[in-house]
């Protein structure tokens, strides 16, 4: 259900349109105000920006080249996730779609929804049916969320082995373990039988109806059927590719962590100040924070979360801020021009275009092992 149409396909009353527009304007204003507050008022209070800039300039060309190479590899890792989740997709197509959608989600308030629409449009223009695209989106999203929940658990385990667990970290880790177990149980039950899938769909619909009543939206229907259909298609995909999807998803998360770790070391934050497990814990916390879409791509929010946790772990304030800013340039800013170029190239790559087929071609729903 989106902001413009109800779940039954009917257009909303005209009186709701201005309200929706005002909501988008307010969201954009709030995001801008939050970003300005963090970068103009908060971070300068943490460290002197002249010292931050000095630490950044102190990096050698070898260190800069290494960082850029790791950052480019990090961008490429999620292409492999899409290739694993969408049989028939080429690496080049995955690159274009991923970078274009990332550029949108990083720049537009609420851009994650528009990014999904762009992904749909691109894959559909390349001959993939919407049902197959939807399945790939759901599976990649589920595995991505599993990884987001699993990384804090791993970080807590590593910190425990080092004897470096505080009460706050233990609480956060236990919450992460509980959320991960709950998510896995729901996913397994949804795939177990049609009856359990229908039950989960109906339960989810009842839960969602509470919020739709508050928003004066229509009551959600047909979720049991949707979950049953999801189960049928997901079983075939996961039976053949669960291991590839798991490995590529973990690789994409750990590659992003590696960019942060290497940036910290190249700027001058040593292992003695903030060890690799503490960096992993800070990274995991920042990733969880982005689950709340306060700003496009978590701009400002991620910087604040990383700076706070890394300084608390023992890092030099100026070096931490310098590292976080360089890290965000490589992982947040760099994909934007690349994504714009990919979006501009999309209609010009005519050899990829084809009509979605009822069966066969890249849109097949049943996959086989590689």
Image: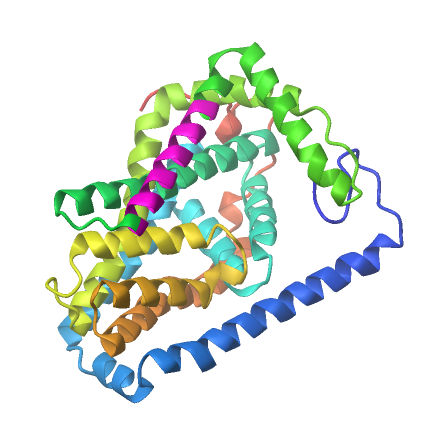
Q: In which quarter of the view is residue 210 placed?
A: top right
- 33 over 138 or under it: above or below: below
Which color scheme is applied? rainbow
Q: Is residue 223 above or below residue 117?
A: above
What span is in magenta? 168-186
Decide: is 344 above or below 197: below
Q: In the image as oriented, which residue stretches furthest toward the bottom?
A: 50
Residue 126: horizontal and vertical position, in percent? 54, 41
Q: Is residue 26 above or below residue 182?
A: below
Residue extending furthest toward the right: 14
Depth check: give the residue in front, 94 or 261: 261
Q: Is residue 136 magenta?
A: no
* Front residue of this view, candidates 348 and 314: 314
**Which residue corresponds to the image point at 17% horizontal and 55% vertical from the top-left?**
276
Q: Nearer the viewer, residue 71 or 168?
A: 168
The quadrant holding residue 25 is bottom right
| Residue 337 at x, y percent in the picture | 45, 67
**Main SS category, magenta section:** helix
- Residue 368 in view of the camera: no
């Amino acid at each position: 259900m989106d902001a413009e149409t109800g779940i039954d396909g009917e257009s909303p009353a005209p009186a709701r349109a201005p309200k929706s527009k005002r909501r988008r304007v307010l969201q954009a204003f709030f995001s801008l105000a939050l970003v300005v507050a963090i970068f103009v008022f908060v971070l300068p209070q943490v460290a002197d920006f002249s010292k931050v800039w000095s630490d950044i300039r102190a990096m050698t060309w070898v260190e800069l080249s290494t960082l850029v190479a790791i950052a480019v590899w990090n961008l490429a890792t999620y292409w492999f996730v899409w290739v694993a989740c969408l049989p028939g997709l080429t690496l080049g197509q995955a690159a274009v779609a991923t970078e274009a959608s990332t550029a949108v989600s990083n720049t537009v308030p609420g851009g994650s929804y528009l990014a999904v629409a762009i992904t749909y449009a691109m894959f559909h223009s390349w001959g993939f049916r919407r049902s197959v695209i939807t399945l790939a989106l759901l599976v990649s999203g589920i595995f991505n969320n599993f990884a987001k929940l699993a990384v804090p658990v791993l970080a807590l385990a590593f910190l425990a082995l080092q004897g470096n667990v505080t009460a706050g970290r233990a609480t956060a880790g236990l919450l992460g373990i509980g959320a991960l177990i709950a998510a896995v149980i729901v996913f397994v039950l949804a795939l177990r039988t049609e009856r359990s899938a229908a039950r989960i769909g109906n339960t989810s619909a009842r839960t969602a109806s509470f919020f739709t009543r508050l928003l004066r939206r229509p009551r959600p229907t047909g979720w049991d059927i949707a979950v049953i259909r999801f189960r049928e298609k997901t079983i075939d995909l996961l039976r053949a590719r669960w291991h590839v999807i798991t490995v590529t998803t973990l690789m994409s998360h750990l590659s992003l962590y590696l960019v942060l770790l290497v940036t910290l070391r190249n700027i001058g934050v040593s292992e003695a100040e903030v060890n690799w497990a503490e960096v992993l814990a800070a990274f995991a916390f920042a990733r969880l924070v982005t689950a709340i879409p306060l700003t496009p791509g978590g701009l400002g929010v991620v910087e604040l979360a990383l700076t706070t946790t890394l300084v608390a772990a023992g890092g030099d304030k100026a070096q931490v801020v310098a590292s976080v800013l360089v890290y965000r340039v490589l992982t947040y800013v760099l994909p934007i021009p690349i994504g714009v170029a990919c979006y501009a190239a999309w209609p010009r790559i005519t050899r990829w275009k084809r009509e979605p087929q009822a069966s066969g071609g890249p849109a097949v729903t049943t996959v086989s092992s590689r």
